[in-house]
Amino acid sequence: MRLDADLMADANDEDRCSYTFDPERRSSVAGASVTDAFDDDNGLWRCPHDSHEDSDRCPIHLPPSETPEGAVERQFLERIAQVGERSKQFIGAHLADFDFEHAVVECADNHAIDLRYATFEGTTTLSHAIVRQPLNLEGATFEGRAEFVDTRFQNELYLSGATFERDVRFFGARILEGMWCYEASFEQADFHRSRLGGPADFTDAWFGNCQFRETVFTARADFDGSVFEHASFAGVQFHDRASFDDVRFPETVVFRHAEFDDIASFDGPVPLGESTYVDLRDAILERGRLVPPEANVVFDLENATVGDVSFTEETPPPDLFDRFRLLNTTFHGFDFGAYREALNATGWEIHRTAAVPGLDAEPPSAGTLEGTYLKAKNGANEVGDTKAAAEFFRKEMTYRRHQHASGIRDGSLADRAAALWRWTANALLDATAGYGERPSRVVVVALLTVVGFSLVFSVTTSTQPYGNAYGYLILSLESFITLVLGGAASIEDPRVRLLAEVEGFMGAFLIALFVFTLTRSIHR
């Protein structure tokens, strides 16, 4: 049963606006069809408002050229102030300028202001206004500029299927209960510093140029299937799930300094052109998916924080890490173990990236790479992946040696000498034990030491120990392990005794190093 105001609106058909809306024009957008309860005249929706003076239409449905100045605003405010759903329906409105700047738009009830399929020829202005009603603009066409600067929408805003042919500005707007823009079209959209307090649905929307810089999404944000010709999400904050699955991105899309507090899903983005560079530098991704469909999509995670994020949902391809730029990236809960085969294929190098337009980065310095692998090692240790931690530690030490090599070429003589000493110590630790991660190298060095000293003994003394050629090898092995059985040959030559003592010292050092690396490898 309709309210009294609705009955009064339809009571006098002689004074009623003759405008009708054909339901066949309704959008395919879910929820954007005309309410069947008010269909009449062979299923057509008919305007419930009074016609204007000598015209058969109300000011809102008159052609803009025939509408008296101020008539639209007066009728709009008068009608929405009445109680009931019908009084707030302006479906198919045809308007020139629609100016409610600094206004307070509110009603006596909570029915939505219904401007579905309206056409706005001129400038639409709600800047600095407060809109307390749900506002339904589904299927509307904005031929002129739309201004919603610092507007406070205290209820839902429906824009599904709407078309903005020129720029629309939501700069600093507050949309508290949700925004639905399914299949909407934005030629130029500026959401800079806006705040969306409810669900934000931009599924299958089209953006010619959009700016979501420093926008705050406090509830779920869906951009699945959307198309972006130019886009910036720099500094955006997503406090709930943010989904960009199957989107079409331009050559470069910016998410720098973005914060994803919940699931961030970039599953299968498709380049509009030949490639896409997704700039996620300095971003924070707590969890989610970054799944590039092919090598011509690159995610730049330099200085970013990556949590429980998946890079693929299938068997990782060998070139998987070519699709990510990982420099000084902090890993907080990232599972390296899921990508062990891909990491083995690259020699555990994670900093190499496929070249795509938009990625104009200088080759990283040795210091940057040392820091990169230090953070990767710490991230692997955090989740208990000792194998990955060991490999990243070796990379960290390797690039530290490269830094020492740079120091040898620059600086004062004392500085260069110190750098040479550090480089030598680093290189020896790598060669002898793989930085404490390769016990097999210690065994090989020990065997070479025993054989090498046996050859030196053969040159130093002509007297064969134990009376045969094998005596030199026995003498070297005895010196290495500092174990001499009874009846050993007497060595009087001080040169040979000095060499034996040196080999004994090296043997003790290598045995201790072997025990350390073996224990470390078992622990890993």
Image (tube, rainbow, N blue to C red):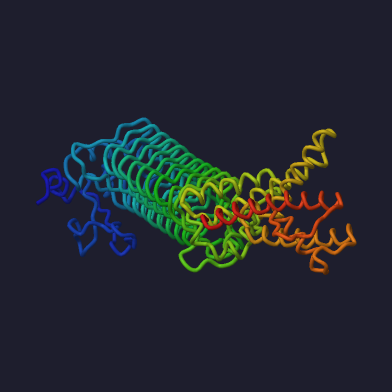
**x 17%, y 51%: residue:** 13
Q: Would residue 442 appear left or right of 493 to someone viewing this image?
A: left
Percent across and percent down for residue 412 are 83, 33
In this rendered view, identify the residue nearer to me: 218 or 348: 348
Q: Residue 427 appears at what percent x and percent y?
A: 73, 50
Q: Is residue 90 left or right of residue 257?
A: left
Instruction: Tell how many labels.
Output: 0
Q: Of all residues shown, which one is farthest toward the front?
A: 487
The percent coordinates of residue 68 (x first, y second) are: 35, 39
Q: Is 350 on the left-hand or right-hand side of 39?
A: right
Q: Is residue 267 visible?
A: yes
- Residues 10 and 198: in front is 198
Please identify the quarter of the rendering in which residue 35 is found: bottom left
- Foreground: 300 or 219? 300
Q: Residue furthest top?
A: 102
Does residue 166 appear anywhere in the picture?
Answer: no
Q: Quadrant of residue 98?
A: top left
Residue at 80% over, 34% down: 415
Residue 27 in picture, x, y percent from top left: 34, 60
Residue at 80% in and 56% down: 490
Q: Nearer the viewer, residue 290 or 275?
A: 290
